[in-house]
Amino acid sequence: MKHLSGFVFFVHFCAVLGTAAQSPVCLYSDPGIPQVAFAAGEIHEAYARRGETVAELPPAGGEGNACTLKIVLQVEAGPKPQAYSIRRQGQNLTVSGSDAAGTMYGGLDVAEAVRLGTIGQMGDSEHSPNIERRGIKFNIPLDVRTPSYSDNSDSAQNNIPEMWSFDFWTEFLDEMARDRFNVLTLWSLNPFPSIVKVPEFPDVALDDVKRTLVPMDDTYSTSGSDMFRPVLLTKTETVKRMTIDEKIGFWRRVMAYARSRRIEV
């Protein structure tokens, strides 16, 4: 039993030494910049999928000598918007963006390389967009009373509640940033009663969110000229209770989140 105990102790001691010898990946970034913080989070998540942890260190401090890989995300003002460079020196990988958007895109490149298992192959490179504004056209079904260009369908009516879900927008905007889109255009025939209020016309502003339960058919125009018919209001469902002030606050929050991903609405 003495020999067995000694063997167990020896194995445990080696395991402790092995754990201590495995230094983490170290990430230097500024969490006060939302775009950089998003890219840093993507890097953390990419390593977590591989069962690895990342040590988060401040941009101008911390000891990186014990790190297996040192990743730096930094903003250095440059003449080209959204541009970034990647530099590798041994186990140091530095992403330098000309602005916060550039640093974010460079950090997303690093996260993608981690997911693909190609982080070790990343070398020196320069990046800038060929198209400055990259956008999505979104016909937005806000309410049966404020239709978009394609609300005359069951799918659009079913999606009205999602337009008032902040979780939907955070997921959608995050995915836009990952795909390098930076413009979101929201299309509606007359959205204003659902998103603003004018003191001179208080009855125009709409409380609550409604959709119709009247079945759709193929007699509606697809040109945007026949999106609303009075019959649609004969049978409606309130899908969310909101005052117009709460609606205004909601869209301000959505647009602020978009800015944190460098997306123009």
Image: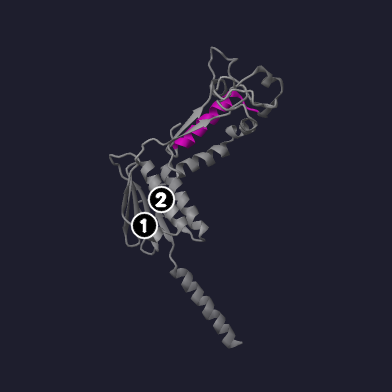
**Is residue 122 depicted above or below 34 in this figure?**
below
At which x and y percent is residue 196? 53, 21
Q: Is residue 189 left or right of residue 35?
A: right
Specify the amino acid type for callout 1: Met
Q: Which residue appears farthest toward the top when viewing the image?
A: 200
Q: Secondary structure at mark 2?
A: helix
- The magenta region covers 241-259
Near-viewer residue (92 or 233): 233
At which x and y percent is residue 11? 53, 78
User: How busy is the neighbourhood of tag 2: few (under 14 within 10 Å), some, or many (20 plus)?
Assistant: many
**Is residue 206 depicted above or below 90 in this figure?**
above
Q: Is residue 32 visible?
A: no
Question: Residue, x 58% and y 15% (percent of image)?
Answer: 202
Q: How many marks?
A: 2
Q: Which residue is mark 1?
A: 122
Question: Mark 2–mark 1 contact, CB under 8 Å?
Answer: yes
Question: Residue, x 54% and y 80% (percent of image)?
Answer: 9
Does the magenta run of residues contain 228? no
Q: CA distance from mark 2 to mark 1?
A: 10 Å
Q: Secondary structure at mark 1?
A: loop
Specify the amino acid type for callout 2: Asp
Q: Which residue is mark 2?
A: 109
**Is residue 31 depicted above or below 262 in this figure?**
below
Tell me which numbered mark, 2 or 1, is placed earlier along the sequence: 2
At which x and y percent is residue 93? 35, 56
Q: Is residue 184 visible?
A: yes
